[in-house]
Image (tube, rainbow, N blue to C red):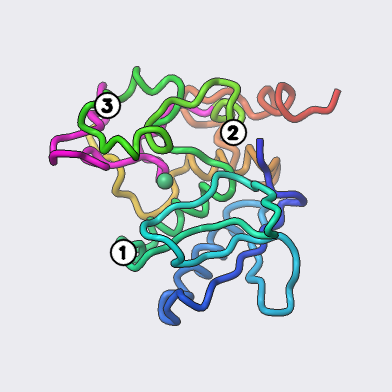
Amino acid sequence: MRRWPNNTVLVKIDAGIPQDKRHHIYTVMDSINALSCLKMVNASEGDSGYHILVNTFKPGCWSMVGHTGSDKGWQSLNMGPTCFSNGNRVIHHELLHALGFFHMQSRHDRDKFVKVYKDRVVPQNWEANFKKKGEDEGTVLWLGLPYDYNSIMHYSTNAFSLNGKITVEVLGKFSGEIGITRVPSRGDVAGLNRLYECWDHYLGDDIPGATPYKQIHQKYFKEN
Ligand SMILES: [Zn+2]
């Protein structure tokens, strides 16, 4: 579990991010602060300390998962030019990675909810984006929350397709469209608050199929 210490996350924006895009990032940080007990802080020049660097150094939209504590004193959140085209979807999505969340379709129990067509996925994208995460890996077992088609961490039906054919097919009753939402779902918000022990915020105990947070907390967060 790679949580940010003291629920505090310093974010710096590299000069390569266009001026007119910056306020979108600040808006999403403010929104996360309002929904949780996290403190996402805009690290101006003077602020020192380990931070997320939002940058355009490499192609694509991606982030390290959780607080990695890299020796260089910062970790990367890459936002290429196309990453600002879907409202604030991608900013939310990448910041949730940086806060510790994997893709919804990487859950160990995903086969009950979606069919993933491995042979249609661009091979370089398989491991990081579709491979199932073991029960003991990463964010403690999805924190007792059920599979969530509405998650902002869910991919769309033809994500990373080699040939245009669908890569992620919904099984079961969900009638919406996966992978398009621009705001975190209530499950996403609950996950964030469960991971960071935000007792005064929404914890998702009313979500059908959720394990009460108290039990999850007892199991994963209590020292003794
Ligand atoms: Zn992602």
- Judge whether 205 appears above or below 178 on screen: above
The main secondary structure of the magenta stretch is loop
Indicate the quadrant containing the C terminus: top left, top right, bottom left or bottom right. top right
Indicate the quadrant containing the N terminus: top left, top right, bottom left or bottom right. top right
Marks 3 and 2, how far apart in space?
24 Å
Q: Residue at x 71, y 26 (%)?
A: 220
Kind of element beneath mark 3: helix
Please state which amino acid type lies under the numbered disc 3: Lys
Which residues lie in the magenta part?
A: 145-174
Marks 3 and 1, how far apart in space?
25 Å
Q: Residue at x 44, y 67 (%)?
A: 56
Which label's residue is closer to the chain start, 3 or 2?
3
Kind of element beneath mark 2: loop
Marks 1 and 2, how far apart in space?
28 Å
Residue that label 1 marks? 82
Residue that label 3 marks? 118
Task: Specify whether 220 is left or right of 132.
Answer: right
Residue 62 at x, y = what percent? 44, 52
Which label's residue is closer to the chain start, 3 or 1?
1
- In which quarter of the view is residue 13 placed? bottom right
